[in-house]
Amino acid sequence: MQEGNRSGVIQRLLENESAFRQFIRRRVPDEVIADDILQQSLTRAVERSHSLKNEQSVLAWFYQILRHTVADYYRAHGAEARRNEALLRELTISGNHQEPPLDELQATACTCLHGLLPSLHENYAELIKRIDLDGESPAQVAKELKISRNNLTVRLHRARHSLRASLEDACGVCSRHGCLNCTCG
């Protein structure tokens, strides 16, 4: 496709942005996710504009891209939900889904922990801070995050695992023994 035609296609897509957004919102209830899907679709359209044979069919062509992007989102979302459920089943069977008492966690917290929190994924750091350090109720945190308690349990397990790995990297042997006598601070 010629560069002049490509800019015409892009202009036409931008002119119809509101209709595209409504199309996605009927299929995806979360506005933020809908915006992400629209952005991904526009990026795909720009990348693949060379494959458009007839500029007259640009809208039908783009709606096809939108449908595929929405389907990709639900496919990925379903896979994540299945992974979370499998991990939760594994944790439940092994008994590792139980949360230790807050006073037990605070007694064993390494002084390096607070310095390492910012290096974790933002969501992981937030969960550890809110639940493990500040003592917020997991049920309340799950409610505020609009996720199931099971999903929170899985995320918290992953957050703790990530923190444990960071502590082992930073502190070495000290962290493997519960950091009761932390000498690395």
Image: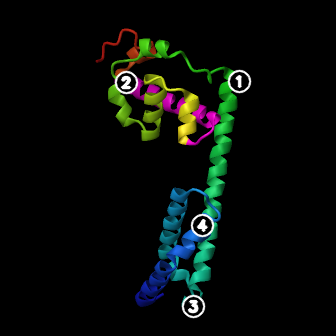
Judged by its main secondary structure, the magenta piece is: helix
Secondary structure of residue under mark 4? helix
Residue 81 quadrant: top right
Disc 2 to disc 3, C-alpha distance: 59 Å
Circle 2 Cα neighbour tier, 10 Å, few/some/many (<14 / 14–19 / ≥20) = some
The mark nearer the N terminus, 3 or 1, is: 3
Res 138 seen here: yes
Whether label 2 touches label 3, CB < 8 Å: no
Residue 36 drawn at (x, y percent): 50, 61
Query: If the image is split into quadrants, where does the C terminus sit?
Result: top left
Whether label 1 touches label 4, CB < 8 Å: no
Secondary structure of residue under mark 1? helix
The mark nearer the N terminus, 3 or 4, is: 4
Circle 4 Cα neighbour tier, 10 Å, few/some/many (<14 / 14–19 / ≥20) = many
Q: Residue furthest left?
A: 185
Q: Residue 56, which numbered label?
A: 3
The mark nearer the N terminus, 1 or 4, is: 4
Whether label 3 touches label 4, CB < 8 Å: no
Secondary structure of residue under mark 2? helix
The mark nearer the N terminus, 1 or 2, is: 1
Q: Residue 113, which numbered label?
A: 2
Inspect the image, locate mark 4, and give the three-letter code of the amino acid beneath it: Ile
Disc 3 to disc 4, C-alpha distance: 22 Å
Inspect the image, locate mark 2, and give the three-letter code of the amino acid beneath it: Leu
Q: Residue 49, which numbered label?
A: none
